[in-house]
């Protein structure tokens, strides 16, 4: 998660380590008219050492990029050059056409930038690394692009004003995304139920596949953050269809025999394709088109449930595959500059593996508890996103107002942990309400399980935003295996939550998690 407010962390930490006066008020110190040469040299050496140490901590290397002598000095010291009157030195520079688009997006951040390294950090936070900036934005690399942006008029202008952090507001509109997530799965489930056991098993596999694949789709979308990478997103749709057709046929053959292969193939392909289309529309924030795309398939699925018949189920299945796909193709008409190849997908495939491990644990838990006790988790998907967003926003605000890592941890630890606990309690309360309805929900085991499991989901989602997908994949995969081997659902949820606490506390000790 990144934005104008989230990037203040880098600037505040750079200003702190360089010893620049006036940081509390945002006002640059006056320049001494007659500095002591020996004192200035000692101060400059200290500032260079501090800046290099911070750069190594935050970016994993102490190497400095090849810049002009003037900008190398600016980058190493962390202090912008000033004239004898204290005014900032503005150097004119022409930008490549594509880089002008980036400059417009980073205009507010650039007005608060202290040096070139800070702008480079902003670019990295937006997913613009060396390769992307070279291939698509006409720069020689990350620091070359940062230097060109830094030289534009208006850089650092906002530093003369006092920065007052505004309080975080909870994004209530995200709550609507939870019911939207339910539409593809509900339509597919109703249709598959009318086509036999093989189709039902194929639906489960395709839905689990879609859970993880949509995370890769989201990553591909942000491979080109300032445009729509249409070709690459359409490639994800093609892969969804192929994986669903193949997986659905194979698992139907295993579960129900050769006679179920055809229906399993059709159901697997349709559900996986519709899940891929849903991921594309959600990544583009096309919520209205998303709801419209699944309205007619869901209506047809309701008719199939009321009057079961194979022809009606096949017609509804066709709607489920075609309508969302056409909507996604319409939303990705712009081809974009990202290539539709494996090299584009490769960086985001670990996200899919992480999602598949979560889906495996969810399926294993549904086998042990039943589907209805997990309904609050599905309906609460929007609340999950909103809670993670709100927690991160609070961390970003803390980074603008606190100066040491200890102070950040005093804010960050309760924010994230209490947020996870609150999310679990809310979903547990929803389960209690649902138990009052004539539904097969047993509160004796499901209440504790859903509360702890939901809290673990919250921590997992926050950690995934901090790029800790490797350890999360291992935790969820082990949890799914433990459930299959007979571990009780409450104990599974408790152990999973405890396992999430270790990487969460480690991540909260990293200043990069507050950006």
Image (cartoon, grey):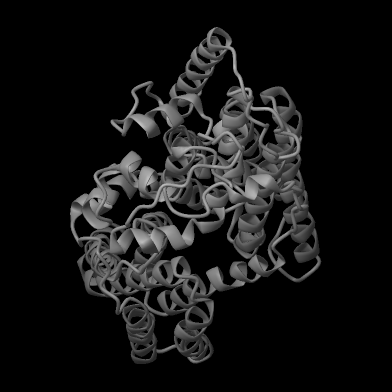
From the top left corner, tell me how far across and down residue 319 is, in percent. 37, 87
Q: Is residue 411 above or below residue 208?
A: above
From the top left corner, tell me how far across and down residue 166 is, in percent. 76, 53
From the top left corner, tell me how far across and down residue 327 is, in percent. 38, 83
Q: Nearer the viewer, residue 42 or 458?
A: 42
Say which quadrant the C terminus sits in.
top right
Q: Is residue 236 visible?
A: yes
Rendering quarter of residue 495: top right
Rendering quarter of residue 97: bottom left
Instruction: Determine whether, in the image, residue 154 is placed left or right of residue 163.
Output: left
Instruction: Determine whether, in the image, residue 382 is placed left or right of residue 478.
Output: right
In the rendered picture of this protein, how many numbered marks are placed on residues? 0
Q: Is residue 452 visible?
A: no
Q: Residue at x 47, y 69 (%)?
A: 282
Q: Is residue 80 above or below residue 335?
A: above
Furthest-front residue in this view: 34
Instruction: Determine whether, in the image, residue 339 is placed left or right of residue 143.
Output: left
Q: Nearer the viewer, residue 414 or 62?
A: 62
Q: Residue at x 28, y 56 (%)?
A: 137
Rendering quarter of residue 335: bottom left
Q: Nearer the viewer, residue 118 or 126?
A: 118
From the top left corner, tell me how far across and down residue 376 is, in percent. 67, 60
Q: Nearer the viewer, residue 102 or 228?
A: 102
């Amino acid at each position: 998660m990144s934005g104008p407010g989230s990037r203040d962390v880098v600037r505040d930490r750079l200003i702190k380590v360089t010893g620049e006066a006036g940081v509390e008020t945002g006002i640059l110190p006056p320049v001494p008219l007659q500095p002591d040469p020996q004192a200035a040299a000692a101060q400059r050496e200290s500032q260079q050492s501090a800046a290099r140490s911070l750069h190594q901590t935050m970016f994993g290397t102490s190497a400095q990029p090849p810049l002009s002598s003037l900008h190398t000095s600016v980058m190493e010291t962390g202090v912008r050059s000033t004239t004898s009157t204290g005014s900032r030195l503005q150097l004119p520079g022409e930008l490549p056409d594509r880089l002008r688009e980036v400059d417009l997006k980073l205009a507010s951040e650039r007005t608060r930038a202290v040096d070139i390294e800070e702008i480079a950090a902003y670019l990295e936070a937006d997913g613009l690394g060396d390769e992307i900036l070279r291939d698509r934005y006409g720069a020689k690399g990350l620091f070359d692009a940062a230097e060109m942006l830094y030289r534009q008029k208006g850089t650092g202008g906002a530093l003369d004003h006092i920065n007052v952090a505004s309080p975080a507001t909870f994004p209530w509109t995200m709550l609507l995304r939870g019911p939207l997530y339910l539409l593809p799965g509900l339509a597919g489930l109703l249709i598959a139920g009318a086509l036999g056991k093989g189709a039902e098993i194929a639906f489960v596999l395709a839905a689990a596949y879609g859970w993880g694949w949509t995370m890769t789709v989201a990553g591909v979308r942000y491979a080109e953050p300032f445009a729509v990478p249409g070709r690459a997103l359409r490639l994800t749709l093609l892969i969804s269809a192929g994986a669903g057709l193949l997986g659905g046929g194979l698992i139907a053959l295993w579960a129900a025999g050769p006679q179920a292969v055809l229906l399993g193939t059709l159901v697997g392909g349709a559900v996986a394709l519709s899940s891929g289309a849903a991921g594309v529309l959600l990544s583009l924030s096309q919520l209205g088109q998303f709801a419209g795309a699944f309205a007619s398939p869901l209506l047809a699925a309701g008719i199939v449930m009321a009057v079961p018949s194979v022809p009606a189920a096949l017609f509804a299945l066709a709607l489920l595959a075609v309508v969302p796909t056409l909507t996604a193709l319409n939303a990705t008409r712009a081809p974009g500059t990202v290539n539709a190849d494996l090299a584009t997908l490769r960086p985001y495939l670990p996200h899919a593996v992480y999602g598949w491990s979560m889906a495996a644990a969810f399926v294993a838990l549904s086998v042990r508890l039943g589907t209805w006790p997990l309904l609050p988790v599905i309906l609460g998907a929007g609340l999950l996103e909103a809670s993670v967003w709100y927690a991160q926003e609070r961390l970003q605000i803390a980074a603008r107002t606190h100066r040491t890592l200890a102070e950040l941890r005093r804010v960050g630890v309760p924010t994230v942990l209490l947020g996870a606990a609150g999310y679990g309690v809310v979903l547990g309360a929803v389960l209690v309400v649902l138990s009052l309805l004539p539904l097969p929900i047993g509160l004796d085991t499901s209440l504790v399980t859903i509360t702890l499991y939901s809290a673990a989901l919250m921590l997992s989602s926050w950690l995934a935003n901090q790029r800790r997908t490797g350890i999360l994949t291992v935790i969820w995969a082990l949890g799914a295996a433990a459930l299959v081997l007979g571990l009780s659902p409450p104990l599974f949820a408790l152990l999973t939550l405890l396992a999430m606490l270790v990487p969460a506390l480690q991540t909260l000790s990293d200043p990069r998690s507050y950006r």
